[in-house]
Image: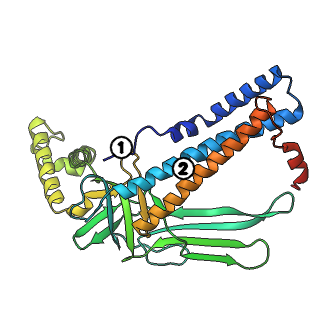
């Protein structure tokens, strides 16, 4: 299978975005001074065109990132719950509640929800806009189930792709509030692409529980007396070994009667930060969505870079012609 998680240039750009921008602006300003083109209009033009070239490059590269997601969905085979292997997997099934859950706005029974509350506000120039006043999503795990079994799904860190199930704008007078809610109902068919792995390391979990129980014995006089055979108020080596053995026996009994196997294995984002998608859309719809976004981003980013680069080079007299974007004139014609 192709390695979709190689070095990501987008992460580099996000990390050093400010540094790259400052360096490019400094280089352009120094170049303009050397060419005696450092007038106010030239500086404004250089600054805008350099920044927009960076934006175009980012959009262009993001298109390839989205295309990689599309290819991943296409290439990963859909598994049944029973045949799903550890690692990156793709499963389709019905949502099932592990814990009772209702959405906060409509009180709908669900396995997952996300909500957004916005308030209408007015800016300094009298224009209105919507500002977020509250938002959130559920973090409770739920099951995905097909005819072969069920698996636990941890939604934390997932890219959840859902259409809005509820939209409402409260009132007509200013300031209004707008409410939006997304949710996945029980029995609704869902698509999950993520990393299948152990929910916890059984050995490490056992050690942690044992250490906690032994700590309780040391700190609580009543429990200490249970294992203090000679009643001298202290545990010698033999009594301590007996206490450890007894606690181990109790823990083993608890773990044997503990969670079922499907609770020990979970689909999540994983430690590698691999792609993690949860959606109520079909695989075909997701492929089409990412393909449109990818090709649109590549085309838009390429166009921005070419147009800005031509204007920049023409402004610096590196290209013949008169194609220079008149930024000052554009600002004068825009009524802010």
Give the left or right position of residue 182, taking residue 29 as reference. Answer: left
Q: Position of residue 313 (x, y in %)?
A: 75, 33
| Residue 76: assigned label | none
Give the left or right position of residue 239, taking residue 9 as reference. Answer: left
Q: Position of residue 307 (x, y in %)?
A: 71, 43
Name the residue at the top extreme.
34
Give the left or right position of residue 175, taking residue 162 as reference. Answer: right
- In the image, residue 217 sits, relative to residue 187, either above or below, namely above
Name the residue at the front extreme.
320
| Residue 63: assigned label | 2
Query: Which one is nearer the viewer's eye here, 30 or 130?
Result: 30
Residue count near mark 2 (Cα–Cα under 10 Å), binned few <14, some 14–19, many ≥20: many
- In the image, residue 126 sits, relative to residue 87, either above or below, namely below
* Pointer 2 with pointer 1, Cβ within 8 A: no
Which residue is found at the position 81% from the left and 43% from the top?
Answer: 325
Query: Which one is nearer the viewer's eye here, 65 or 255?
Result: 65
How is the rendered protein coloured?
Answer: rainbow
Res. 333 in view? yes
Q: Position of residue 107 (x, y in %)?
A: 50, 78
Which residue is found at the position 39% from the left and 45% from the top?
Answer: 4
Q: Position of residue 66 (x, y in %)?
A: 50, 52
Q: How many marks?
A: 2
C-alpha gap between disc 2 and disc 1: 18 Å
| Residue 3: assigned label | 1
- In the image, residue 21 sits, relative to residue 259, either above or below, namely above
Query: Which one is nearer the viewer's eye here, 122 or 312?
Result: 312
Say whether disc 2 or disc 1 marks the residue closer to the N-terminus: 1
Q: Quadrant of residue 312?
A: top right
Query: Which one is nearer the viewer's eye here, 300 or 17?
Result: 300
Res. 228 in view? no
What is the secondary structure assignment of the residue under circle 1? loop
- Classify the position of the C terminus by image quarter: bottom right
């Amino acid at each position: 299978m192709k390695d979709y998680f190689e070095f990501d240039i987008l992460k580099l750009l996000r990390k050093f975005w400010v540094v790259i921008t400052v360096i490019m602006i400094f280089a352009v300003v120094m170049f303009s001074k050397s060419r005696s083109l450092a007038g106010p209009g030239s500086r404004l033009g250089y600054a805008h065109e350099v920044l927009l070239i960076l934006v175009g490059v980012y959009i262009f590269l993001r298109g390839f990132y989205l295309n990689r997601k599309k290819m991943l969905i296409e290439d990963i085979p859909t598994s049944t719950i029973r045949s799903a292997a550890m690692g990156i997997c793709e499963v389709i099934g019905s949502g099932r509640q592990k814990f009772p859950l209702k959405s906060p706005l409509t009180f709908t029974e669900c396995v997952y929800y996300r909500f957004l509350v916005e308030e209408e506000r007015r800016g300094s120039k009298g224009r209105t806009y919507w500002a977020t006043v509250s938002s959130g999503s559920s973090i409770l795990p739920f099951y995905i189930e097909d005819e072969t079994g069920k698996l636990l799904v941890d939604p934390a860190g997932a890219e959840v792709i859902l259409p809005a199930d509820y939209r409402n704008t409260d009132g007509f007078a200013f300031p209004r509030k707008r409410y939006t809610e997304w949710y996945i109902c029980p029995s609704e068919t869902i698509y999950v692409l993520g990393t299948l792995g152990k929910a916890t390391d059984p050995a490490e979990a056992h050690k942690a529980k044992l250490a906690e129980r032994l700590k309780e014995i040391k700190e609580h006089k009543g429990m200490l007396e249970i294992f203090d055979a000679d009643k001298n108020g202290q545990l010698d080596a033999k009594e301590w070994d007996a206490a450890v053995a007894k606690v181990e026996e109790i823990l083993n009994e608890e773990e044997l009667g503990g969670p079922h196997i499907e609770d020990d294995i979970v689909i999540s984002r994983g430690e590698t930060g691999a792609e993690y998608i949860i959606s109520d859309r079909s695989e075909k719809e997701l492929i089409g969505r990412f393909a449109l976004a990818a090709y649109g981003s590549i085309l838009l980013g390429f166009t921005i870079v070419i147009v800005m680069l031509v204007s920049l080079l023409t402004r610096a007299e590196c290209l013949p012609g008169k194609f220079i974007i008149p930024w000052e004139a554009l600002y004068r014609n825009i009524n802010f």
